[in-house]
Amino acid sequence: MTNAEHSSKKPKTVEAKWMLRLYVAGQTPKSLTAFANLKKICEEYLQGSYQIEVIDLIVNPTLAKDDQILALPTLVRKLPEPVKKIIGDLSNTERVLVGLDIRPIL
Amino acid sequence: MAKPNKKTKPAADGVLKTPTGIKGLDEITGGGLPQGRPTLVCGGTGCGKTLLAMEFLVRGATQFDEPGVFMSFEEKSDELTKNFASLGFDLNELVGQNKLAIDYVHLEPSEIEEAGEYDLEGLIIRLGHAIDTIGAGRVVLDTIEALFSGLSNEAVLRSELRRLFRYLKDKGVTAIVTGEQGERTFTRFGLEEYVADCVIFLSHGISQQIATRRLRIVKYRGSAHGTNEYPFLIDSQGFSVMPVSSIGLDHPASSERIQSGIPRLDTMLGGKGYYRGSSILVTGTAGTGKSSMAAHFVDAACRRGERCLYFAFEESQNQIIRNMQSIGIDLGKWVAKGLLQFQNARASLCGLEMHLVIMHKAVDRFDPAIVVVDPISNLVAAATEAEVKSMLSRLIDFLKMKQVTAFYTDLTSTSGSLERTEIGISSLMDTWLLLQAMEGSGERNRGLYLLKSRGMAHSNQVREFILSGGGIQLRDVYIGPGGVLTGSARLAQEARDKAESLMCKQDMERKRRDIERKKTAIEAQIVALRSELEAEKDDLDRILAEEKQRDETLASENLDRVKARQADTAAGLPTSSAKTGTGGRK
């Protein structure tokens, strides 16, 4: 599933304003939860303008060093700058929103 | 001080060990760190944890062909590279050869938002990847505690750390984990809880404004280890620990004798000089010639072609060389030949242990036959008496183990007993010479006593010790009815004695001549008497002869008369003549 998503990058909107990367290690319950939570949040707040890339560190271990990944799962906001990191299974939506700097649109 | 609980044989006790290659540490641990297990190195700020850890990797890569991974949570790779370049470690080269991997883990709490459950699988993957890439056998985590300040969920951290260490064990890598010293614990976050196999504690103590770094093995599961605090040194060659406290009393004893450089002193020392590998102490008040004796000893050794190491705590090399020239000893040429090396340092330059470490290193490097420490009393400036004594006993043991003959000088204060060393180490010494100033008739002279010399029949005599342009000379002191005299008093007394004896001699001569004369006179008398006697004897003979003549004449006249009277033939001629003869004699 993760691998499939990795390649699909689902919502291929033309202008992906938000570039998000989710680092996981295999299909652990935590990574599945994280992905599901991320999906939910993005659909709710960033509909149409986001792009999620899932990176499995078991497949690409070098990226752990290059991107300074420590805890898993880690969500990295590549765009918009500055880069931000959120760790955990993203179950705390409030903190995810703070971390991604998304203000609920009124 | 010396504890006998040290094992020198590596891996003698079941636990497999990975040699660190760090000087001294392998000896204390009995072969190295536990193989395939993590070791905790803890201590305060700036006590050398990172250095110890890095040297472990560098030595592993260069000496034992075992690549290593350095995971840094504090310093960036290029900072590390720069810092270790000053110690002569070229990290970039090792990284280039795939013998070392440096991974800097950047942790900035403000950049990380925690939203839900997480684990440290990322870290483990990273580490695992680095280990697998270069085939590392050694791993350093410096300082993993940074995680505690970077991440807030301590419960997760703790369980993850446990998992990490288990992972390292499973991987079979020998790891060093560093940790900052906590207030009452070895590490601030209780890392010792997870790393239970071996704990090394580094400290940086300051006493009398002099800092000394020390290392202690708090725990080593399944292995004997030295338990003392061992001083260590960080210098341009890296880390070195001195397992000095572990030296025992099993040093060899040589029966070879070496000359002291002063022939008369050799005579006092049973005729042959000091024992090789023994400890010689010269004590004395200021200006009694202690250093000069040391210089003689060094000179004699250099002449034999032996190497000498001179630790001077009071004078500079040039000063010593100049001063010794005044008594006819040229130490400069031995320095030029490489047989003599000076190590000049003020005693207060560093702590005592550090001095010891420096001395150890110097002795190991130079490999001398003779070591001079001039003077040991100065070391008190760096520490208390008890510490100096313990340090010196270790130095003595160390030098004895190496069969190095050690020559110590000690300045005693003028007050108090002279037969007492400042540091109370005389009992550790094999030969003890005392130089004493003898005052009298307006001058100070030097007296040399041989207080003790183990294992030889030594002289009990006081000698006058004279420093001349030709070196040290020993003279018998004047001991006579006038008491013990030295210097000009001795000379005067000797002159007086000489005059006296001359007079005595002349007297005797005169008496002898008198007797001779008498003898001659008496002999002459004897001759005269004898000739008188001869003369009288001659007279007597003559009288006797005349008488005989007369008798004979008488007898013949009688016979004639008988013949003439025609006497009866009563008797033949002979009979009558015999009768008459007899009668005539009467």
Image (cartoon, coloured by chain):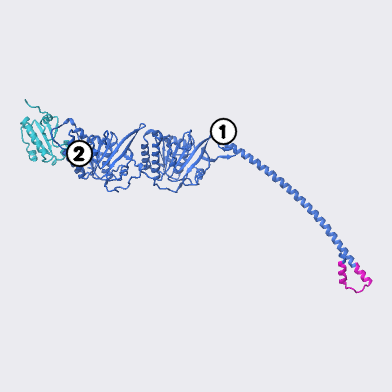
| Image location of residue A61, percent across then percent down | 15, 40
Give the answer, above or below, for where B553 lies relative to A32: below
Disc 2 element:
helix
Give the answer, above or below, for where B585 lies relative to A85: below
Q: Is residue B242 magenta?
A: no
Colour of chain B in the image:
blue
| Image location of residue B87, percent across then percent down | 30, 37
Q: Nearer the viewer, residue A8 or B445?
A: B445
The magenta-colored residue range is B557-582
Q: In the displayed structure, does residue B555 sit left or right of residue A16?
A: right
Q: Is residue A93 visible?
A: yes
Binning the other alpha carbons within 10 Å of mark 1 as few (below 14), some (14 to 19) or many (20 upward) gives: few
Label at residue B441: 1
Q: Nearer the viewer, residue B27 or B256?
A: B27
Binning the other alpha carbons within 10 Å of mark 2 as few (below 14), some (14 to 19) or many (20 upward) gives: many
Q: Quadrant of residue B45?
A: top left
Q: Nearer the viewer, residue B485 or B181?
A: B181
Q: Residue furthest top?
A: A106
Q: Residue furthest right?
A: B565
Label at residue B161: 2
Q: Do callouts 1 and 2 point to residues on the same chain?
A: yes
Colour of chain A in the image:
cyan
| Image location of residue A75, percent across then percent down | 12, 34
Label at residue B193: none
Q: Is residue B89 visible?
A: no
Q: Main secondary structure of the magenta part?
A: helix
Q: Chain of mark 2?
A: B
